[in-house]
Image: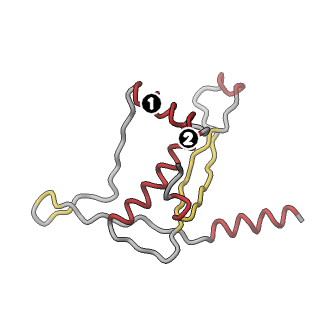
């Protein structure tokens, strides 16, 4: 039945082993004391740069989110290769938040309606999306 096949596909997806990110070598800030891990980096794009990202997404025929996810998958592979983190059949997984709000939710104060989507890709699929 369709429900049984869907449950099987869900479990198969959840149980797939994915390649972890290679931890960077500790950065020593003070003698004998390593920098904390994981690092949290936050940033934003100025208007011109954001417009360039939108233009690239249009050029590829995808959404900005699609483009950013593809670049994130590539960055994971580059990071692991740069840090000599070899795995036999690497797979990468991203957890993508998804907004479930509709136009009717606009008047609802302080409401979060969201979900998550797991995106799995084989490393080979992330090497070049040109």
Local crowd size for mark 1, using a 10 Å CA cut-off: few (<14), some (14–19), many (≥20): few
- Secondary structure at badge 1 equals helix
The front one of 84 and 43 is: 84
The front one of 124 and 116 is: 124
Q: Earlier in the sequence, mark 1 or mark 2?
A: 1
Q: Residue at x 70, y 25 (%)?
A: 103
Q: Answer with the quarter of the image where residue 62 lies.
A: top right
Q: Which residue position is annotated with label 1?
A: 50
Q: Residue at x 27, y 58 (%)?
A: 36
Q: Position of residue 71 (x, y in %)?
A: 47, 49
Relative placement, left or right, of 91 versus 32 is right
Q: Position of residue 46 (x, y in %)?
A: 38, 27
12 lies above or below 45: below
Local crowd size for mark 2, using a 10 Å CA cut-off: few (<14), some (14–19), many (≥20): few
Q: Position of residue 72 (x, y in %)?
A: 47, 51
The front one of 9 and 34 is: 9
The front one of 103 and 24 is: 24
Residue at the top extreme of this rendering = 107
Q: Which residue position is annotated with label 2?
A: 65
Q: Answer with the quarter of the image where residue 111 lies.
A: top right
Relative placement, left or right, of 51 versus 101 is left
Q: Residue at x 56, y 72 (%)?
A: 17
Q: How many marks?
A: 2
Relative placement, left or right, of 105 versus 34 is right
* Label 1 with label 2: CB-CB less than 8 Å: no
């Amino acid at each position: 039945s369709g429900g049984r096949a869907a449950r099987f596909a869900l479990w198969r997806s959840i149980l797939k082993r994915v390649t972890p990110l290679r931890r960077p070598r500790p950065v020593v800030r003070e003698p004998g004391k390593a920098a904390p891990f994981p690092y949290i980096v936050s940033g934003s794009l100025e208007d011109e740069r954001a417009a360039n990202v939108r233009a690239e997404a249009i050029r590829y025929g995808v959404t900005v989110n699609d483009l950013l996810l593809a670049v994130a998958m590539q960055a994971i592979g580059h990071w692991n290769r740069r840090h000599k983190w070899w795995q036999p059949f690497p797979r990468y997984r991203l957890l993508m938040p998804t907004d479930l709000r509709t136009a009717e939710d606009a008047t609802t104060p302080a409401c979060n309606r969201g979900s998550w989507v797991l995106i799995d890709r084989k490393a080979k699929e992330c090497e070049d999306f040109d």
